[in-house]
Image (cartoon, rainbow, N blue to C red):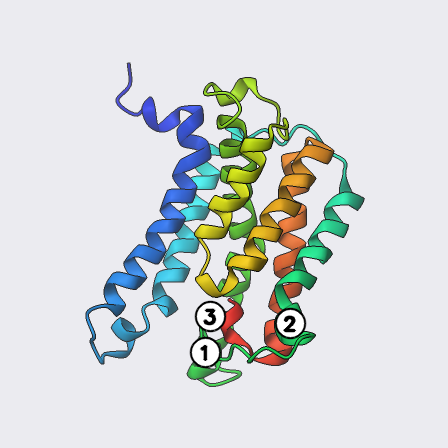
């Protein structure tokens, strides 16, 4: 047996990109905890997140043929869900007057219009609109929601409904977000789970998540609320 057989297993395919992604946050927190005043250590997100994006993209390419994107359709449901989630995410500031979230990943620190500004911005949108939806939906709806139904998760269909699995995935999805986002993240987890159940399509889940994040990116650029990244 090849020593790489475990890395090529179905479970690895659905989980490795996610844990690589989460590793980026662990590294960022560890570097920030050093208390260094050196810019690249005090603000490691400016280089850790592009690295995180590249590594996740490599993992997705490596495992791509193992993902179940065979079922298409559900575009209307996915699009509607994506817009609903976007509304839920920005409503506290946009509608209810909560304090704006201006502290965060601000590409303007490199000077608007500079090469580094545009490089940073493009990398950030690639992460937000492509990598995050793929990595998270492959893990949450493609793997965990099915694994909680059946340990041999490949024998469970995408979106196979079990109430405990449905709720637990929404809770876990909430917990990996910052505490300020917990109410919105929980509701969003429920909506994306609904897309999975309604359409039975992992692709539809990715479209919903990607549309939400594209709209959120546009909102961030329009309002300069970098804390939404």
For disc 3, the marked residue is 120
Residue shown at 63% from the left, 40% from the top: 193
Nearer the camera: disc 3 or disc 2: 2
Q: Is residue 199 left or right of residue 101?
A: right
Residue shown at 42% from the left, 82% from the top: 110
Instruction: Say above or below: 206 vs 144.
Output: below
Q: Is residue 220 left or right of residue 180?
A: right
Q: In which quarter of the image is the N terminus?
A: top left
Instruction: Say above or below: 131 vs 7.
Output: below
For disc 2, the marked residue is 219
For marks 1 and 3 on the same chain, the one whose residue lies earlier in the sequence: 1
Q: Is mark 2 on a helix, strand or loop?
A: helix
In this figure, what is the number of numbered marks?
A: 3
User: Spatial distance from mark 3 to mark 2, Cα to Cα?
Assistant: 17 Å
Identify the image quadrant of residue 105.
bottom left
Disc marking residue 172: none
Give coordinates of residue 28: x percent, y percent: 31, 62
Identify the image quadrant of residue 27.
bottom left
Mark 1, residues whose alpha carbon is within 10 Å: few (<14), some, or many (≥20)? few
Give coordinates of residue 208: x percent, y percent: 67, 49
For disc 1, the marked residue is 103
Q: Is residue 44 left or right of residue 146?
A: left
Give coordinates of residue 73: x percent, y percent: 76, 36
Give coordinates of residue 183: x percent, y percent: 56, 58
Residue 120 seen in this snapshot:
yes
Nearer the camera: disc 1 or disc 3: 1
Residue shown at 61% from the left, 23% from the top: 157
User: Spatial distance from mark 1 to mark 3, Cα to Cα?
Assistant: 17 Å
């Amino acid at each position: 047996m090849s020593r790489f057989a475990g890395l090529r297993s179905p479970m690895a395919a659905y989980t490795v990109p996610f844990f690589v992604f989460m590793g980026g946050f662990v590294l960022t927190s560890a570097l920030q905890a050093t208390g260094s005043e050196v810019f690249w250590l005090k603000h490691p997100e400016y280089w850790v997140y592009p690295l995180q994006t590249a590594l996740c993209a490599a993992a997705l390419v490596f495992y791509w043929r193992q993902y179940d994107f065979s079922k298409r359709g559900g575009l209307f449901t996915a699009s509607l869900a994506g817009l609903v989630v976007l509304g839920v995410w920005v409503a506290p500031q946009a509608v209810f007057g909560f304090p704006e979230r201006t502290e965060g990943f601000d590409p303007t620190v490199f000077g608007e219009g500079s090469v580094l500004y545009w490089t940073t911005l493009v990398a950030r949108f690639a992460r937000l609109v492509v990598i995050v939806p793929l990595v998270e939906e492959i893990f949450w709806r493609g793997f965990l929601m099915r694994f909680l139904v059946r340990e041999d998760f490949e024998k469970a269909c995408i979106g196979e409904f079990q109430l405990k699995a449905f709720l637990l995935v929404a809770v876990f999805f909430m917990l990996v977000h910052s505490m300020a986002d917990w109410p919105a993240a929980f509701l969003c987890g429920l909506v994306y789970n609904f897309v999975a159940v309604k359409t039975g399509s992992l692709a539809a889940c990715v479209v919903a998540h990607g549309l939400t994040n594209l709209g959120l990116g546009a909102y961030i650029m329009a309002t300069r609320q970098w804390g939404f990244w």
